[in-house]
Image: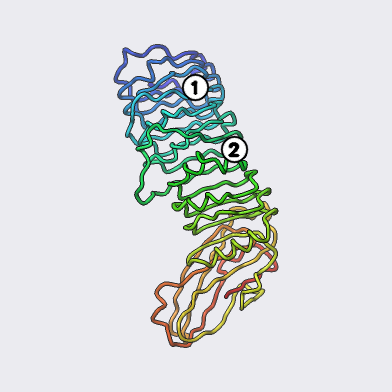
Amino acid sequence: MCFEGCDSLREIPDLSEVPNLKELHIQSCMSLFKIHDSVGLFKKLETLSARDCINLFIFPCAINLPSLKDLDLLRCKSLKRFPEVLEENNNELSLSLGGTAIEELPSSIQKLLGLKDIFLNESESLNRVPGGILKLSQLQNFHAESCKNINFFESSECEEAATSSEPEDLVVNLTDSGLNDEILASPAFISSLYQVTNLCLRGSSFTVLPASFKECHSLRALYLDYCKELQEIEGFPPNVLTFSAMECSSLSSQSSRMLLDQAVLKTNRTFNLPGQGVPEWFHYSSNAAKLTFWFREQVPAIAFCFVARELQPDDIGQSVDLRISVQIHGLSNHKSNYSSMFIPDGITDFDEEGMEDLERKKIHLELDLNNPPPVGDDELSAD
């Protein structure tokens, strides 16, 4: 059933006599203000799309939609309430709730056990989210950028949805969502992160990354760029492989040194850090895009660092391809490619796989910025 763009439609009436309805498309119905409660009880409804219905403010107070796969309420900016979920639903499901006036996601939303993606961007009235939603075993994307008042609360409902197995990729993006020290240190927030693998807190206002972040063992990537009030990092997730703290201008020297230590603590890590130059403990340095040196016997672990000028707006999103070429008397050539987003000051360390057979031979190693960043005075170093 489709009423897309029907400006004269003001209300979706009782549709109980259409029990087999599978799709309801009512996008961009500018005069629509009400959807009847019966729409929330269709057993076969798979798609409900009311995006850009800017005057919609009466929605079913409760839903039991066991076949639902896609609920799209994007930019329904008059909608203040998300319905209670009456029964568990194992279907793979996507929720698009960005740009609404929804103030709270009820605890019962955790009954949507098949929830895969939820988009809440620019829902500035949203202030209560059950932390357990991030423990749903099928969830892959939780995006709440520019949700300025977001907060997480503890809920015991549907705790069995959490999984203790090896985590799937779960991306949580809370960019520009006003997270402060109180929220970051709350047990509800920390416990909700235990399954998260990729966490973005860019543009937040907290001053301390609390010690409790050490408990986030699933976390593989952490982005703190433009957290300009961040001063101290008291707890660092132990399994993070990708870390970025671009433009964290208030970060203490002690925390900066700790991050450098973390960068070389394990192999295959990429750290993007604020700073003014190459650390003194790097033994080899060059202002060119290439760095060449020789060594004998066992192939060592190698850390390399490149430093560039201050990031400009046009640089955002550009990438740097780092090509590592290993040559032995010009006969062998082992190459690996590492890519990272271009930011000022990047540090990566690695222990090149497949090089064990090169032991006890004279080795010429070349580090090459294959696609140099748009800067005029680069410095490349290795240790």
Instruction: Note whether 166 is above or below 71 in the view shown.
Output: below
Quadrant where the image shows the N terminus? top left
Crowding at dot 2, Cα within 10 Å, few <14 / some 14-19 / many 20+, comes out as many
**Secondary structure found at label 1:** loop
Q: Is residue 329 left or right of residue 256?
A: left
Instruction: Note whether 5 is above or below 289 in the view shown.
Output: above
Q: Disc 1 residue type?
A: Gly
The residue lying at 58 percent from left, 74 percent from top is 382
Q: Position of residue 271 (x, y in %)?
A: 56, 61
Q: Position of residue 43 (x, y in %)?
A: 30, 23
Q: Disc 2 residue type?
A: Ser
Snapshot quadrant of residue 281: bottom right
Residue 275 tag number: none
What colour scheme governs how the chains and residues are painted in the rendered image of this protein? rainbow
**Secondary structure found at label 2:** loop
> Which of the pair 232/22 is nearer the observer?
232
Snapshot quadrant of residue 111: top left
Q: Position of residue 226 (x, y in %)?
A: 65, 49
Q: Give the residue number, with chain letter if any, for mark 2.
A: 146
Mark 1 vs 2, N-terminal side: 1
